[in-house]
Image (tube, rainbow, N blue to C red):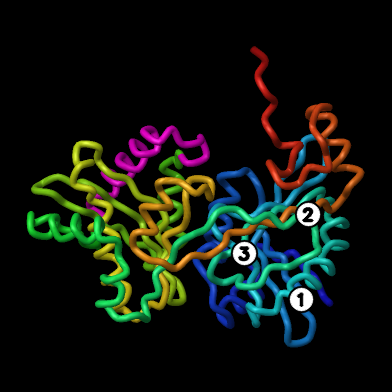
C-alpha cells in the first residue's frame, strides 16, 4: 500500500472526491478552515492499494514539547472509501498508515466517523468508541410518509405556525447573515455551550467562502422579526443541518420546527436523498436528540476511533500533563495530554 499525507492543494485530494460520495466535511477548503481555528495544518491521509483507496481529512497540530498529533475536523469527516462497506480494507489502510504517521512525528490519531458514509467501522484497531445516535431523514420516501413519520406534536406546531402566517425560506442574498450570527451565539449562551461552539466571524466568513453555493441560510420570520435562522449544506445528495439559532422571544412558537420542515421539503424537491440532523449535545441522548427524532425514525450510531501512534511518547506526555491520569484509558477524553487540569478547590 502507498500512503501519503496530502496538502490542501493536492490534485489527488480533489480527484478522489470527484470519484466518491462525500460530504462538505471532506472538502479541502473546509478542512483548512477548521485547521485555522485549531492552529493546525490541513491534511488528508491517502492510502492506495490497487483500485482500493481511502481518504481521511485531518488537522495536524503541534504537541507541546515536540511532535504532532492528528485529529478530525469539526463535524463528521470520516474516512472515504471507494467501497464504503469495506471495513476490512479500512482497517488495513489505517494499519498501513501507521509507519507514515510515526515517521511524520505523530503521537496520536483521533477520528470522527460519518454516520451515513461509514456503514462499516474497523474492529480490533485502537479504541473504537460508540457514542449516542444521530438522526437522518430518508428523502426517498414520499412526502406523505415523511409527514406521517413526523411526531404528532411537531405536526401540530408546524400546522399552527403555517396557519398563523409564519414563513420559512432561504435567504438568497444573505441579508440576515448578521442576525443569524447573533441568534446562534445567544442560543449557545442559553445552552451554556462549551467555548468551542462560539464561532467567531472569521469562521462564518470562512465557511461561506469554503462551501460556496453548497451553503444556504434559512430564516423563519414571524411578522417583521427573524425568529430563527440556520445554516444547511448540500453535498452529493446529503443536506446537513449545520448550525442554527432562535430568538428566545419566540420560544413558544418553536420556529425551528417550521424551518426543518421547510428545508426537508426543499431538499426532497431537489432530489436529495438524505437530510442529516445530527445528534444531541456531545452525542448525548438528550432533549436535542429527542427534538430531532421528532422528524424521523431513522437512527445511526456515531463512532470515534482513538489510536496511539507512539506509545512511549504518549505515556510520557500524559504523565507530564497529570500524573493522576491513566495513559491506558482510551474511552474518555482523547488524547489525554490535552485534557484540561482539574481546578483545585
Q: Is residue 173 visible?
A: no
Q: Which residues are magenta?
A: 174-197
Q: Is residue 212 left or right of residue 251?
A: right
Q: Residue furthest top?
A: 345
Q: Residue furthest right?
A: 312
Mark 3, residue position: 78
Image height of 90 relative to 71, above or below: below
Report x, y in % for residue 100.
Answer: 84, 62
Q: Quadrant of the C terminus?
A: top right
Q: CA distance from mark 1 to mark 3?
A: 15 Å
Q: Nearer the viewer, residue 186 or 134?
A: 134
Q: Earlier in the sequence, mark 2 or mark 1?
A: 1
Image height of 328 relative to 242, above or below: above
Element under label 3? Answer: loop
Q: CA distance from mark 2 to mark 3?
A: 15 Å
Mark 2, residue position: 307
Q: CA distance from mark 2 to mark 1?
A: 17 Å
Report if the CB atoms under discs 2 and 3 are less than 8 Å apart: no
Mark 1, residue position: 88
Report if the CB atoms under discs 1 and 3 are less than 8 Å apart: no
Q: Quadrant of the N terminus?
A: bottom right
Q: Quadrant of residue 135?
A: bottom left
Callout in the foreground (2, 1): 1
Magenta segment, prevailing SS (helix, strand or loop): helix
Which residue: 33% across, 36% down? 186
Amino acid at each position: 500500500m502507498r500512503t501519503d499525507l496530502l496538502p490542501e492543494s493536492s490534485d489527488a485530494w480533489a480527484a478522489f472526491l470527484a470519484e466518491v460520495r462525500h460530504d462538505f466535511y471532506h472538502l479541502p477548503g473546509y478542512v483548512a478552515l477548521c485547521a485555522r481555528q485549531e492552529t493546525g495544518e490541513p491534511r488528508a491521509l491517502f492510502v492506495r492499494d490497487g483500485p482500493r483507496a481511502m481518504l481521511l481529512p485531518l488537522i495536524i497540530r503541534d504537541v507541546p514539547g515536540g511532535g504532532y498529533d492528528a485529529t478530525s475536523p469539526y463535524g463528521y469527516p470520516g474516512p472515504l472509501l471507494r467501497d464504503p462497506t469495506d471495513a476490512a480494507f479500512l482497517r488495513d489502510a489505517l494499519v498501513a498508515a501507521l509507519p507514515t504517521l510515526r515517521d511524520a512525528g505523530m503521537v496520536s490519531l483521533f477520528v470522527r466517523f460519518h454516520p451515513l458514509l461509514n456503514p462499516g467501522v474497523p474492529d480490533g484497531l485502537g479504541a473504537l468508541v460508540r457514542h449516542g445516535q444521530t438522526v437522518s431523514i430518508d428523502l426517498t420516501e414520499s412526502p406523505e410518509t415523511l409527514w406521517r413519520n413526523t411526531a404528532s406534536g411537531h405536526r401540530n406546531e408546524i400546522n399552527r405556525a403555517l396557519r398563523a402566517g409564519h414563513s420559512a425560506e432561504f435567504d438568497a442574498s444573505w441579508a440576515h447573515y448578521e442576525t443569524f450570527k447573533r441568534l446562534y451565539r445567544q442560543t449557545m449562551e442559553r445552552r451554556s455551550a462549551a467555548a468551542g461552539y462560539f464561532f467567531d466571524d472569521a469562521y462564518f466568513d470562512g465557511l461561506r467562502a469554503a462551501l460556496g453555493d453548497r451553503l444556504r441560510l434559512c430564516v423563519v420570520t414571524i411578522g417583521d422579526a427573524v425568529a430563527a435562522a440556520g445554516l444547511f449544506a448540500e453535498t452529493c445528495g446529503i443536506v446537513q443541518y449545520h448550525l442554527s439559532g432562535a430568538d428566545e422571544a419566540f420560544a413558544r412558537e418553536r420556529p425551528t420546527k417550521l424551518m426543518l420542515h421547510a428545508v426537508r421539503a426543499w431538499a426532497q424537491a431537489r432530489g436529495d436523498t438524505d437530510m442529516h440532523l445530527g445528534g444531541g449535545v456531545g452525542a448525548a441522548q438528550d432533549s436535542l436528540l429527542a427534538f430531532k427524532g421528532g422528524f424521523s425514525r431513522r437512527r445511526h450510531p456515531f463512532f470515534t476511533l482513538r489510536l496511539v501512534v507512539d506509545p512511549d511518547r504518549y505515556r510520557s506526555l500524559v504523565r507530564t500533563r497529570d500524573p493522576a491520569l491513566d495513559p491506558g484509558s482510551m474511552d474518555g477524553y482523547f488524547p489525554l495530554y490535552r485534557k484540561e487540569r482539574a481546578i483545585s478547590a
